[in-house]
Amino acid sequence: MSAEQGWVGTADFSCLNPPRARGLGALQARLVDRIKRAALRRLHLSSRGERLLLRMYLAGEDATERTLLDELLPQSPPWLERQVQQHLADEQRHVNLFAEALRALGDEGSVRLEPDWLSRRKIRRWQRLAHRYAGSFEQGLLVPAYATGLCAEQMAERVLRRHCAVLDPGHRLYPLLARVLADEQAHVRLCQNTLRRIVAPGEAGRLAALLKEIRAVDASFGVSGALAMLGAGWALGGVGRRR
């Protein structure tokens, strides 16, 4: 049976859902969440802080757009191309929305941020994992690419959900963040459904192992990323305060 038709079987794909943190992992997750919420509140005290947040989101959307163009689209079978094109259109719309929000805050965005040093290290580790696991699946590198994409989209959903939670719904940035959050939630479902179609039942265990390693890489940068964000909040939170 082809992947286009979908695999028939009783494979356990529960690994596609974010695992529930336990023990030290749960403690770390709570710590990271508390630090990042504090950093967000601090950054929203100034226009410079808000511009930094928007530029970070813009850098992330730019990186996702490049990944779709350079990695997923060329290797996607014909039945997946339309889906990838729609995903790409969503990411391009997000880039435009964040750029417009930056202009409204007085930032022309002529110099765009690249992903920060920590993010670049995480991406490189994810790429090494993808190539290591590619031979474990009939669909080759396509499976690790979508598995990494799923975890990245789940991370984006978590980040945006947290950001919306610390803002009053009447805040000027809330509608933008809520709109992008809704798109990211749709992208999570899309990646999950795609992986169910392209991973054979006998490969589900290998997919679970891959996802566990991808998420472990993400978690390993959690505390350092949160502290860097908090440092930026203290550096910019009192600068250029809004009246």
Image (cartoon, grey):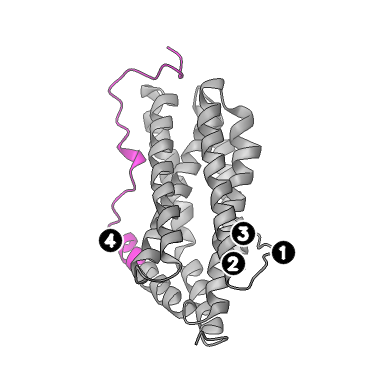
Confirm whether the magenta stretch covers residue 8.
yes
> Mark 2 vs mark 1: which is more N-terminal?
2
- Region in magenta: 1-30
**Count of numbered tags:** 4
* Mark sitting on residue 23: 4
Q: Amino acid at mark 1?
A: Ser
Q: Which residue is mark 3?
A: 115
Of circles 3 and 2, which is in front?
2
> Mark 3 vs mark 2: which is more N-terminal?
2
Q: Which residue is mark 1?
A: 110
The 10 Å Cα crowd at callout 1, few under 14, some 14 to 19, many 20 or more, is few
Of circles 4 and 2, which is in front?
2
Q: Amino acid at mark 3?
A: Pro
Mark 1 to mark 3 CA distance (whole Å):
16 Å
> Mark 4 vs mark 2: which is more N-terminal?
4
Mark 4 to mark 1 CA distance (whole Å):
45 Å
Residue with the most extreme right position: 110
Q: Which residue is mark 2?
A: 102
Of circles 3 and 4, which is in front?
3
